[in-house]
Amino acid sequence: MAEFPSLTRRAALLGAAASGSLLMAGSGAEAQPQRPSELKIGITTFLSGPASVFGVPGRQAADMLIEEINREGGIGGVPLRAFYVDEAPGTDHLVGEYRRLVQSEGVHVMFASISSGSCLACTPLSDELRKTTVLWDCGTQRIFEEARHPFAFRTQGYGTPEILAPLLYLLQHRPDFRTLAVINQDYAWGRDSWELWKTAMDALKPGVRVVAELFPRFNSTDFSTEITRMLALRPDVILSTSWGGELVTLIRQASERRLFERSLFVLPVAEASLPQLGRTMPAGQIIGARGDHWINHPEPRDPQALRRFVEGYRQRTNEWPIYPCHHMAQAMWALRAAYKRAIEAKGGGWPNDQELAQAFRGLEFPTPTATITIREDGQGLEDQIVGLSSHGDRFPYAVPEKMILYPAANVSTPVGQKSTDWLRTLKPEMVQQAGRPLGAG
């Protein structure tokens, strides 16, 4: 980890016209701060636009958890206060707000973001401003594979395990498939997730014929052309890593035209759309949750804690929590654990920015379903659960049955490697070795 400027260096920086932001970052990081009157957290999320179907639940979860933590005495005796930034206006707006919150509002920690593009824009700022930044939801594998970021940490999984686990499930559930089509949103996540899937599939099951690669424009509302083509091609499997309103529309239109009767769908990020779909979601499709936090998890680490979180969110919002809610909770729980660790390391003193960042590295913190470890490169290891969509009396929408849990260490790219390079090395025997069945589903 880089050393911070000395007091002499700081004095020299005062005379440099271009060093304002660096000075602020350095002085905040190297100082031995007094315990503040409030712990300020900047949180970037989508509060408007199509992606607000993820962003608003994330904020609602943050508000609920901050109130709970404050009722319990805060973190280290300090109450939390959130400053929210809407991601919807774009990365230029986001970068400006990040700087404003750090330099003018004096936030202690930044939480960023839902969009992978937002995270790619904000993470370099954590380096420049030396401000601990928690990547609370974005999935791009590029963050920690392309550069080292001493002040950035992701408190959940990411694209590679979230794509690999459903592929492994498919290969175990339906190993005889021969043809596949993909229909993904035409932007970074849609393209990158397809590259991850295709690379791993070629290694684990060579010879699968890709009959169509369809990338309708982002925010599409009519998939009739794509559905007509897939009905004609009749692929054994249809992959879609789409999310939000577009996934809901695709599933509804595909169901109306009975496409689910001809092809098996694999939907790695379906969980967040299932409450909105209700019983429209056909049974027997492969569904993922970007983690292990299904509300019908048969073997959670702490069943009562999971029940409290789900019921608390439902009572507050009249909605079921979806994965951005769980990811926001994981970020809050990690923050609490990191401050506890840093304060104990200082013998009860309040940590500065560098000391807080050091506390995140190698941190283990519990969630209701498992324990998450943050690796030395800043990446969180989160287990993945995949199953088949099913309907019952307990929930008004589809939840998984015949679940398989894939431990994070088995499906995550090793430190220091690129995901695509690692995926090319996978062997077919991994299909039977990587996961274990859970309960009765």
Image: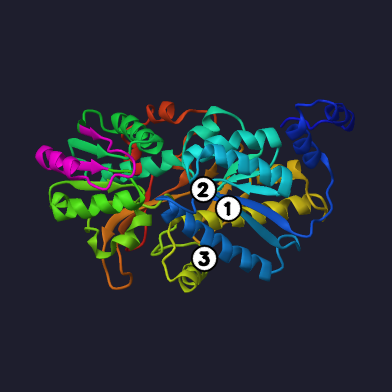
In space, the residues marked 2 and 1 are separated at their CA atoms by 8 Å
Q: Position of residue 281 (x, y in %)?
A: 25, 58
Question: What is the crowding at mark 2: few (fewer than 14 residues within 10 Å), some, or many (at least 20)?
Answer: many
Q: Is residue 255 magenta?
A: no
Q: How is the image coloured?
A: rainbow
Q: Are marks 2 and 3 in contact (CB under 8 Å)?
A: no
Q: State which tag comes first along the sequence, 2 or 1.
A: 2
Which residue: 48% across, 39% down?
116
Q: Is residue 352 visible?
A: yes
Task: Residue at 50% x, 40% y: name it.
Answer: 90
The quadrant of the picture occupied by the C terminus is bottom left
Residues 421 and 193: in front is: 193
Q: Dot 3: within a 10 Å radius of its alpha carbon, few (fewer than 14), some, or many (20 or more) residues?
A: few
**Could you tell me residue 413's position as x and y percent?**
47, 35
Q: Amino acid at mark 3?
A: Asp
Near-viewer residue (133 or 122): 122
Q: Nearer the viewer, residue 382 or 277?
A: 277
Labels 2, 3: front one:
2
Question: Residue 330: x percent and y percent?
Answer: 55, 55
Look at the numbered disc 1 and give the secondary structure of its residue: helix
Label at residue 331: 1
**Closer mark to the observer between disc 3 and disc 1:** 1
Residue at the far left in the pictured view:
232
Residue at the spot of label 3: 302
According to the picture, the residue beneath numbered tag 2 turns out to be 156
Identify the magenta region: 212-239
Above or below 36: residue 423: above
Q: Are marks 2 and 1 in contact (CB under 8 Å)?
A: yes
Q: Quadrant of residue 168?
A: top left
